[in-house]
Amino acid sequence: MKLNLEQKILTFFVLTLVVGGIGTAALFFPHDDKVISLAAFVVLINLSVGLLMLYTSLKQFGDAVRIAGEISKGNYDVAIPAGRGELRKLFETFAVMLAQLKRRNLNLTHRVYQTAILKEITDRISSLLDANEALEMISGSLGKIVSYSTVSYLTRDSQKKLVFKCHLEESVNRAFADDVKKRMIAAFKLLTEEDVKEEDVKSVYFGTIFDEQEKDPVRAFFNLPMVVDGKLVGIINVASQKAASYSEEETEVLYSIVSQAGATITKIKNLISEETEKSRSMLASLAEGIIMITTLQEVAVINQKAKEILGIADKANVAILDVIGALWGKLDFRSAIERVLMSRAQETFPELVVGTVFYKIVAGPVTNAKKEVIGVAFIFSDVTREKEIDKMKSEFISVTSHQLRTPLSSMKWFMEMLLGGDMGVLSEKQKGVLTDVYNSNERVIALVNDLLDVSRIESGRVAIEPTPTNLMEFFKSMLPEVAQNFAKRKQKFDFTAKSELPRVSIDPRLVWQVVSNLLTNASKYTPEGGNISLELSLEEKDVMIKVADNGYGIPEFQKHRVFEKFFRADNIIKMEGTGLGLYIARQIAEASGGKLWFESTEGKGTAFFMTLPLAGSKRVKMGENLLAPGS
């Protein structure tokens, strides 16, 4: 017979009364052995029953405390004892509560997994996530929800061919995987009504290895179809060697995840499609030609204007080979892409002439939100009008300079006569004034000469005339022209050649014009007592000429304008100069087949570098590419 808590207390109370009564009797009959024996026996029985009741109660109470502790730790699989009496009801309550907590915890786990998958899909859709990636992502994470022997997915590759990919979580035999493949193909045919042959489906297996000793067949499986924009894009299959492995609740959660993933991809792709269409409409209305090439060498964007410039206006799907072919002989398009990807900066390329129209080509890297370069954008801008204006300006400058040159030369001749005393003796004051006028006239003559050089270069009237030249000996013979500047300003000059140089076919007159300009500038923009150096060295394919100083340097924010016509940096603008020398120098360097660039730190000095090809310069006319067609 089982007693509840109230019955145990009442029994214990009755036994206590009995023991008390017998004890009292023993006091009144102390010499009666039977009475004393009976009293001792009853006390012993009472003590045993009490201890048993106390032990049982403490044990059940301890079980209750232990179960409560396990539940608080999140262990919802703890075993619940049957219990007795009132504690039995408590344990039954624990069991109901555990079942509810376990169910809620499972639901929460499913929701967290579902949210994580959808978030990852949403995050990665901006990085060109497609349905195949989503299928791979989901199938790779199903182990968080269910256990399986294999997880597989059937989808199309980039060539639109069906591919069966199977991950072996447990060792199964080949027949098991083939059975899964057949079931998935059958489901695909049923959902799409396509005639799919098993031999046309490529199979890819990964994970553990096949074990032909395993004979267990597919005993439990389910398929999860993914639909994007109303079309079946793939199927996920989960299969197990164990029967009844998957509950209805688990399959419903996974169906929900795949369904929401498909809906998310559909929604975001539609949004991207709408934005892309807006961008295409905007690009189509631009006057500039726009081409964007991805890092995979694919044409991501090309507007109608760019197609017209390239002469492929009627082509619907433009590939990179179409662009390369259209620019053949005018621009090395692949090299231009690589140049931008390597520099990760905006680059300017030679102008493109189409008929009578000039296009300026500028390209720059395209980055995503993570600052990763994902492509290169080219902009073709019509600069024909600017060219025409520049040509008219050059012609005006040329005519004006020619008209000024004669009277300036005459003024110089007359002032030299006056200063030389040919017209009579001058006072010191008169000589001082006349010397100032003479120096000012010299500066104007220098400006006119620079303007005439620019005019001749831009009109194609300056030709490169290559001659085999020993640069070391040639420079030594010409240096006295500029050495007086260094001596006048007490500057230290150093001329070195790091290696023996071969004779190079160049135009020595024009090359010296560049070097002379660089040395003159170095002296002019370096304080008295400074250091200036001229260095020749041999590179792999070029001769390198370096002119360095420790002068004023060039401000960082103005470096990009150094080779512009008439530019003077802020820190030397009050000094003499026309702002044309470096423009002319770069034109000569590039026409000679070399390059001219610089490195500078304001307040520390500047180094100019010029390369000349060992293969020699070509006989060309400078500035022909600056002329308007037909002129």
Image (cartoon, helix red, strand yellow):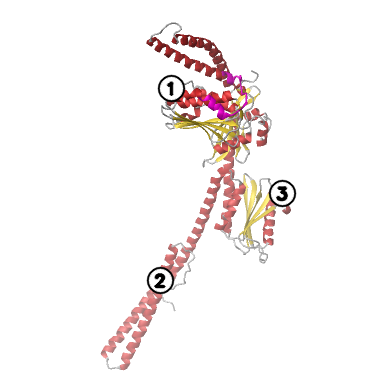
Q: Residues within 10 Å of mark 2 (few under 14, many from 20)?
A: few
Of helix, strand and loop, which one carries label 2? helix
Task: Give amino acid for label 3.
Answer: Glu
What is the x, y in percent for residue 228?
A: 62, 46
Name the amino acid type tagged 2.
Gly
Check residue 575 in the rendering and tell me which mark sits there, or answer none. Answer: 1
Quadrant of the rendered image containing residue 622: top right
Alpha carbon of mark 1 to alpha carbon of mark 2: how far? 98 Å
* Residue that numbered label 2 is attached to: 62
Residue 5 falls left or right of residue 458: left
Residue 303 image-quadrant placement: top right
| Mark-to-mark CA distance, 2 and 3 | 65 Å
State which region is magenta: 455-479
User: Residue 498, image x and y in percent?
Assistant: 53, 35
Q: Is residue 265 visible?
A: yes
Outermost residue to the left: 28
Q: Residue 503: x and y, percent?
A: 61, 30
Q: Which residue is disc 3 drawn over?
A: 194
The N terminus: image quadrant: bottom left
**In the image, what residue occupies the spot 43% across and 32% down?**
604
Looking at this view, is 347 or 618 the one in front? 618
Q: Secondary structure at mark 1?
A: loop
Residue 231 sits above or below residue 365 on the image: below
Mark before the other along the chain sequence, 2 or 3: 2
| Residue 248, image x, y percentages | 58, 59
The verdict on residue 138 being magenta is: no
* In front of the other: 55 or 139: 139
Identify the disc placed on residue 206: none
